[in-house]
Image (cartoon, grey):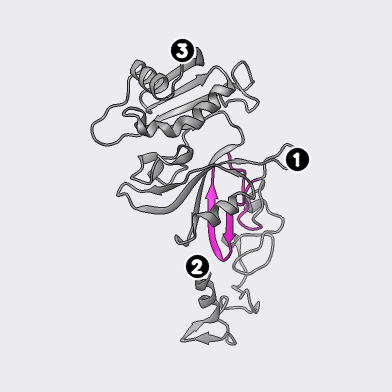
């Protein structure tokens, strides 16, 4: 397990190896905030999820009493007075543990890295369920050689990036190009979180990212809080006119460079070529290289 609560980069469990969001599902509360419920209306106050990762060696999901004794009391040094509740979900393989104070909750999050030294605790990943601004951000830069430091610096524009990194791997143990970071988004001074764009570029290296509760994103103007079909600046990628999408287009195909009809960008009669390929294609390909 790496710093910050992420496991090492070995083969992941199915929910982390798949294409869906790798965040654990959150416990759901009632619509109105009552005792133990935060202003988020459903995120459990001072609650952490201990998610069991099947090692594939025949080890079974820990029963409730041994889990409390060995993991909570033994590995993390908690006492009965530190706990309000420990809820078991056997079919999905996790425990939701609610602590008696915010101080103890943060202490558990800080000490969760110690679990990988414990014979039973090493099978658990601890996910915070309370910090409303905290997310696990899954990011995919198409160039796999982009250094981690550059990615972290990009994310730091939107909040605090916590220690640790997870390289998401498939069932064969092969990295699929995605990385995960835990971060706490900053606010804009008006009570709203500052969100990174779902599509981005670090230098000339493009990528995309996603996280829990990600706002609606427009793939046309790259802005949040509206869909592409509702975008006032929507431009058809076929005829280049505004106000409709390609699927609804009845106009001719136009070149984005010369605006001429009947050919795409870089394929016009006056387009420069190198070795039979348009300069546009060569330039686009070079964007994914790091000098």
Query: In x, y percent, where is residue 218?
Result: 63, 52
Give the numbered dot on residue 9: none
Q: Is residue 163 above or below residue 218?
A: above
Check disc 2: other Cα within 10 Å, few if <14, some if 14-19, many if 20+: some
Query: In x, y percent, where is residue 104?
Result: 54, 22
Q: Which comes sooner in the sequence, label 2 or label 1?
A: 1
Q: Residue at x 47, y 62 (%)?
A: 143
145 relative position to 259: left or right: left
Q: CA distance from mark 2 to mark 1?
A: 36 Å
Q: Residue at x 56, y 75 (%)?
A: 264
Q: Which residue is mark 2?
A: 288
In the image, 114 versus 65, the foreground residue is 114
17 relative position to 102: left or right: left
In the image, 44 versus 243, the foreground residue is 44
> Is disc 2 placed on a helix, strand or loop?
loop
Q: Which residues are magenta?
A: 195-221
Q: Residue 206: within the magenta?
A: yes
Q: Which comes sooner in the sequence, label 3 or label 2?
A: 3
Q: Main secondary structure of the magenta part?
A: loop
In the image, 278 versus 287, the foreground residue is 287
Q: CA distance from mark 3 to mark 1?
A: 40 Å
Residue 218 seen in render: yes
Residue 198 seen in render: no
Q: Which residue is mark 1?
A: 189
Give the numbered dot on residue 80: 3
Callout 3–callout 2 Cβ contact below 8 Å: no
Q: Quadrant of the N terminus?
A: top left
Q: CA distance from mark 3 to mark 2?
A: 54 Å
Depth-wise, is mark 3 or mark 2 nearer the camera?
3
């Amino acid at each position: 397990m790496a710093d910050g609560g992420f496991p090492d980069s070995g083969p992941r469990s199915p929910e982390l190896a798949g294409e869906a969001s790798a965040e654990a599902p959150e416990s759901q509360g009632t619509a109105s905030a009552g005792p133990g419920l935060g202003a988020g209306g459903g995120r459990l106050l001072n609650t952490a999820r201990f998610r069991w990762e099947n090692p594939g060696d025949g080890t079974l999901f820990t029963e409730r009493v041994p889990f409390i004794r060995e993991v909570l009391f033994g590995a993390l040094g908690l006492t009965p007075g530190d706990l309000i509740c420990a809820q078991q979900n056997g079919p999905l393989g996790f425990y939701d543990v609610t602590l008696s104070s915010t101080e103890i909750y943060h202490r558990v999050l800080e000490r969760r890295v110690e679990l990988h030294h414990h014979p039973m605790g090493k099978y658990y990943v601890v996910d915070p369920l309370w910090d409303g601004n905290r997310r696990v951000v899954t990011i995919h830069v198409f160039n796999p050689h982009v250094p981690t430091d550059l990615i972290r610096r990009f994310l730091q524009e939107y909040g605090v990036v916590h220690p640790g990194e997870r390289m998401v791997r498939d069932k064969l143990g092969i990295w699929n190009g995605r990385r995960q970071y835990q971060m706490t988004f900053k606010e804009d001074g008006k009570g709203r979180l500052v969100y990174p764009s779902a599509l981005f570029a670090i230098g000339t290296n493009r990528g995309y990212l996603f996280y829990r509760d990600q706002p609606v994103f427009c793939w046309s103007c790259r802005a949040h809080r509206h869909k592409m079909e509702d975008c006032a600046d929507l431009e058809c990628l076929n005829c280049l006119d505004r106000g409709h999408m390609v699927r609804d287009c009845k106009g001719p195909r136009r070149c984005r460079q010369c605006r001429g009809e009947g050919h795409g960008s870089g394929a016009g009669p006056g387009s420069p070529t190198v070795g039979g390929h348009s300069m546009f294609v060569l330039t686009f390909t070079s964007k994914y290289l790091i000098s």
